[in-house]
């Protein structure tokens, strides 16, 4: 895999609406290569559970969800999805859920905050084989879907944080929040 740099908060591409792809484009070797690169990059990032194309500087509506056990959450069960042209509608109310972003700092300086998220969504997307999906998602995968789908609308998790006093850097998050969860 060639070395790919992650775009960080402040890079204008993270605030742009990503372009939807046609089925022809999804089948192209260029987009299939992009999906492989994104999966590989997310896989090697210790804390990564998803990645959107704009985060690597490509303004197309492709995200990967790659949930795996992480140092913060060793209990996570692996889930892999490619979500192209995604949309979602919330079911019920939103609650504050902790999250960070691979574009919001690195390592111990990654920013975390409590973002308002639906625990239950109805989601539509196209996968890497051009199959359409319309499914109800709940739990952590629903949370990640909202974060990765938002990226493709130019929306960052900080836009979903209501209680700004929850902002903290990774080290403090692990120390104060995760420690008290277990
Ligand atoms: Zn993110």
Image: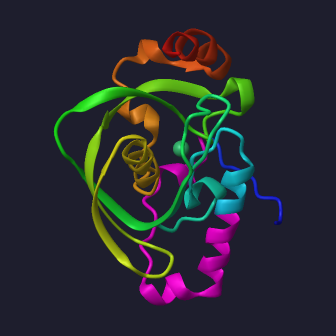
The residue closer to the viewer here, 55 or 129, is: 129
Side (left or right) of 21 relative to 92? right
Whole-percent x, y for residue 6 in the image:
69, 50
In this view, 145 is above or below 53? above
**Range shown magenta:** 9-38
Predominant SS of the magenta segment = helix
The residue closer to the viewer here, 47 or 87, is: 47
Side (left or right) of 106 relative to 54? right
The residue closer to the viewer here, 158 or 12, is: 158
Q: Residue at x 42, y 17 (%)?
A: 164
Whole-percent x, y for residue 64 in the image:
54, 59
Q: Tell me where residue 135 sits by quadrant.
A: bottom left
Q: Specify the farthest residue to the bottom.
A: 24
Q: Residue at x 42, y 59 (%)?
A: 17
**Count of marks overlaid on the render:** 0
Q: Residue at x 40, y 50 (%)?
A: 150
Quarter of the image containing the N terminus?
Answer: bottom right
In this view, 125 is above or below 91? below
Is 104 colored magenta in this rendering?
Answer: no
Whole-percent x, y for residue 5 in the image:
75, 53
Is 29 colored magenta in this rendering?
Answer: yes
Q: Tell me where residue 94 sits by quadrant.
A: top left
Q: Specify the farthest residue to the right.
A: 2
């Amino acid at each position: 895999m060639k070395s790919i740099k992650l775009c960080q908060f402040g890079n204008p591409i993270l605030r742009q609406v990503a372009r939807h792809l046609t089925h022809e484009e999804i089948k192209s070797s260029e987009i299939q290569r992009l999906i492989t690169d994104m999966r590989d990059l997310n896989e090697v990032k210790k804390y990564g559970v998803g990645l959107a194309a704009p985060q690597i500087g490509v303004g197309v509506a492709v995200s990967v969800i790659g949930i795996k056990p992480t140092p913060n959450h060793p209990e996570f069960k692996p889930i892999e999805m490619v979500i192209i042209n995604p949309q979602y509608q919330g079911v019920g109310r939103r609650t504050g859920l902790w999250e960070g972003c691979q574009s919001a700092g690195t390592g111990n300086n990654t920013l975390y905050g409590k973002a308002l998220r639906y625990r239950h969504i109805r989601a539509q997307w196209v996968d890497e084989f051009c199959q359409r999906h319309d499914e109800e998602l709940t739990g952590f995968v629903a949370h990640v879907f909202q974060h990765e789908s938002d990226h493709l609308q130019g929306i960052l998790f900080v836009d979903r944080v209501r209680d700004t006093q929850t902002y903290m850097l990774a080290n403090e998050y692990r120390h104060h929040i995760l420690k008290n969860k277990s």
